[in-house]
Amino acid sequence: SLSDRLEGAFKSLKGEGRITELNIATTVKEIRRALVDADVNYKIAKEFTDKVKDKATGEKVINAISPSQLMVKIVKDELVELMGNEAASFNAKGAPAVILIAGLQGSGKTTFSGKLANYLKKQLRLSPILVAADVYRPAAMEQLRVLGEQIGVDVHLELENKNPVEIAQNAINEARSKNKNVVIIDTAGRLAIDEAMMTEVANIKAAVNPQEILFVVDSMTGQDAVNTAKAFNDRLDFSGVVLTKLDGDTRGGAALSIKYTVDKPIKFISSGEKMDTLDVFYPERMAQRILGMGDITTLVEKAQAQFDEEQAKKLEKKIRKNQFDFADFKQQLEQIKRMGNLKDLMAMIPGVGKAMKDIDISDDAFKGVEAIINSMTPFERANPDEIDGGRRKRIANGCGKDISEVNAFMKQFEQMREMMKMMNKMPMGRMMPGMKR
Ligand code: GDP
Ligand code: MG
């Protein structure tokens, strides 16, 4: 998988603390090759890795993870962003809602139409009907009729009518009279893009004004999928993509290429021939699939937690030596902020939660303190005892606070340090609260 390959490519990097331009160059090539192997179009893979290169340069590697793992996470995050972050909306509301299905022959339109009807009926509690608008192959009509029977959904069939536009319009009328609220029109495809097919689908579109036009594409067709998607989109301006035949180990790179090329959301993915194997498209899951990675993300997150742990240990040592300073204080504040808000944090301390319930603590309380520390020079942060009256005045001016506020904070800080000193003499492990969930 891609993550394994990156691991290999980064072997020489063990021990380096930062991702550098030099070590990126070697791995970017590897990522690109892996993406192409996962069916991502070469040009797109290149553009993509160039972007990743920019993002990754200079990223600091957290102790517990390797540069390769961090790199994989960067790649994954970028993939997710590219594919649209969240599942796209699907609009099946209308009186009735009309959904037009288009794509090449064999891409899986008829199978998908059945799956979609089943999904709308079972998951969304709608009442769909299916329309057989593929008038050229009697077998195609029969196929839809059988699927409809299987899932208990009506199929609108006109065996003698050779006009798909008329069939579609008649079906909508039938839906109205039967109180059906979704009409799914399964159209004819051809083996390759051709003008007659495009004109036919465009005519149906013009006549029925569908609120969703779904372009169905076989994810195993790799590079061709992109060209097909482009041709259909130029002509139909479809609203979403359906990736079919994502069975077994098809890697789904087509998802990335198509999204990149036509910039339309992928709405569903489909695998297998059973009627209940239709899924809403989630970018996060697809990114993991393209990368062939297990739980790198969790690993990186765990490493992050461990990193915090190490910081806490360092802090403890400083406290023990009575060297706790403003820089440490600021770091603590930052950690608290990362944890969420102050009230939530307090509530996690045993026994405190209930008592704090009705008290309003605002996170603004931190802001004042932070502003004061921000106005200190590095020297002052490291040497709290050296901050005399003159320096306090300058700090106060710097952060736009009254000198009395600075004095009050300095006093509190002193008290805190006194308390720390006292606690040091007690046989206790860590006295700074763990500040971890
Ligand atoms: P259409 O010509 O676009 O209507 O395509 P069909 O729905 O008739 O599908 C063509 C072939 O692909 C049929 O044999 C289907 O059973 C098969 N098929 C469709 N969708 C999938 C899928 O998601 N996975 C697999 N493995 N086969 C599929
Ligand atoms: Mg068909």
Image: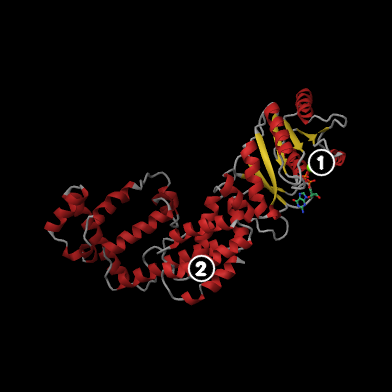
Please name the residue shown 43% across and 70% down the image: 22
Label 2 secondary element: helix
Q: Quadrant of residue 234?
A: top right
Q: Nearer the viewer, residue 184 or 204?
A: 204
Q: Quadrant of the N terminus?
A: bottom right
Give left or right: position of 425 versus 122: left
Give the answer, above or below, for where 73 lies relative to 158: below
Type of amino acid at the residue the image marks with label 1: Ile
Q: State the image quarter where residue 56 is shown.
A: bottom left
| Mark in the foreground, 2 or 1 | 2
Q: In the rendered view, does 220 fall on the left or right side of 133?
A: left
What is the residue that sits farthest to the front in this orientation? 195
Specify which label sits upstream in the sequence, 2 or 1.
Answer: 2
Residue 77 x %, y %:
52, 56
Q: Nearer the viewer, residue 429 or 435?
A: 435
Viewed as shown, does residue 136 lie left or right of 437? right
Disc 1 crowd, CA 10 A, few/some/many (<14, 14-19, 20+): some
Depth order, front residue of 4/413: 4
In percent of width and height, residue 254 lies at 64, 53
The residue beneath circle 1 is 151
What secondary structure is found at the residue carrying circle 1? Answer: helix
Is residue 267 something one can see in this rendering? no
Residue positioned 56% across, 44% down in the render: 263
The answer, for residue 23, to whether it is visible in the render is: yes
Residue lying furthest left:
390
Q: Is residue 342 above or below residue 325?
A: above
User: Mark 2 to mark 1: distance in Å?
Assistant: 49 Å
Judging by the rendered image, the residue that carries numbered circle 2 is 27
* 359 in relation to 392, above or below: above
Q: Position of residue 385 (x, y in %)?
A: 18, 65
